[in-house]
């Protein structure tokens, strides 16, 4: 099965390909504000570099949130368009699950992927490996332990309870002065979502029977949109 993965949910922009148990190709750019202009050409570059055409694809997977409102809309729109145009499944993958699965962790540990949500809060969740794929567990299937939500590091540490000392905080690092940092077994800042892993997780969903109706592919924000916050009189930046 050949699946293309698309990520536009954070500070990076990426496209990757997964086929027959391996990441075939992927490219990642740090250009979040140019997603709409760069994404189509990046897709073409990855496909042509791997020697495949759009018609060879069996599915498309998009990191559909949480993350950047604008980025998520762009990624989902392109993924849905590919699915409709080619008549193939288009599935949404949790951005946090993809970030977790992109990072090897020791057996018995939990991955706590984190994407900044402003004002000291983060989009976080916790995942345990439900099975490993690839050499040395370089990527793995995540099993949700704590569902995604907007939290402070302290709130996440409390939610983990006794598991926090064996949990790895992965992604956007908490503030250096944050005492909750010491609650985690390890903090890995500067990690990003690997688009090839988005494709891997999407391929697993499709193989598991996910319908992948392109019309149902939409962003998962996990907080109100700017328009909704303005209607409620809240800070338009969500801070």
Image (cartoon, grey):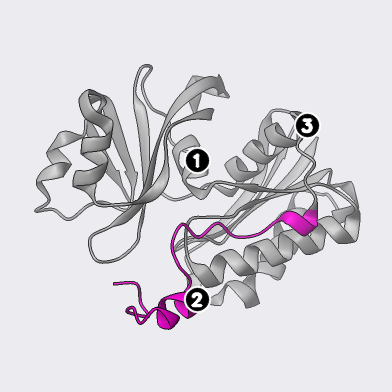
Q: Nearer the viewer, residue 14 or 226?
A: 226
Disc 3 target residue: 209
Q: Earlier in the sequence, mark 2 or mark 3?
A: 2
The crowding category of the residue bearing disc 1, from other C-alpha atoms within 10 Å (few below 14, some 14 to 19, many at least 20), is many
Q: Observer-nearest residue: 48 or 226?
A: 226
55 vs 140: above or below: below
Q: Residues within 10 Å of mark 3 (few under 14, many from 20)?
A: few
Residue 239, image x and y in percent?
A: 28, 72
Q: Which residue is mark 2?
A: 33
Asked if the magenta segment contains residue 220, the reply would be yes
Around disc 2, counting alpha carbons within 10 Å, would you say few (fewer than 14), some (14 to 19), or many (20 or more)? some
Q: Which residue is most to the front?
A: 232
Residue 238 x, y percent position in the rendering: 34, 72
**Image height of 184 relative to 199, above or below:** above
**Mark in front: 1 vs 3:** 3
State the image quarter where residue 54 is shown.
Answer: bottom right
- The residue sitting at 13% across, 53% down in the picture is 176
Q: Secondary structure at mark 1?
A: helix
State the extent of the magenta-drawn residues as a range.
Answer: 214-239
Residue 215: image x %, image y %? 78, 58
> Which residue lies under the disc numbered 1?
97
């Amino acid at each position: 099965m050949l699946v293309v993965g698309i990520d536009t949910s954070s500070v990076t922009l990426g496209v990757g390909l997964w086929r027959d148990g391996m990441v075939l190709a992927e490219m990642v750019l740090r250009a979040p504000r140019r997603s709409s202009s760069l994404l189509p050409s990046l897709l073409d570059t990855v496909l042509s570099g791997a020697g495949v055409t759009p018609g060879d694809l069996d599915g498309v997977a998009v990191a559909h949130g949480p993350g950047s409102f604008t980025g998520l809309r762009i990624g989902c729109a392109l993924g849905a368009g590919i699915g409709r145009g080619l008549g193939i499944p288009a599935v949404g993958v949790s951005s946090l699950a993809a970030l977790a699965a992109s990072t090897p962790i020791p057996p018995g540990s939990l991955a706590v992927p984190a994407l900044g949500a402003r004002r000291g809060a983060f989009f976080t969740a916790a995942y345990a490996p439900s099975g490993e794929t690839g050499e040395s567990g370089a990527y793995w299937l995540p099993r949700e332990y704590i569902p995604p939500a907007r939290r402070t590091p302290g709130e996440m540490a409390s939610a983990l309870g006794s598991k926090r000392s064996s949990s790895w905080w992965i992604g956007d690092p908490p503030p250096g002065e944050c005492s909750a940092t010491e609650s985690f077994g390890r903090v890995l800042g500067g990690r990003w979502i690997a688009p090839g892993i988005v494709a891997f997780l999407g391929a697993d969903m499709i193989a598991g029977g996910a319908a992948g109706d392109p019309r149902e592919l939409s962003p998962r924000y996990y907080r109100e949109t700017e328009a909704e916050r303005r209607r409620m009189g809240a800070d338009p930046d969500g801070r």
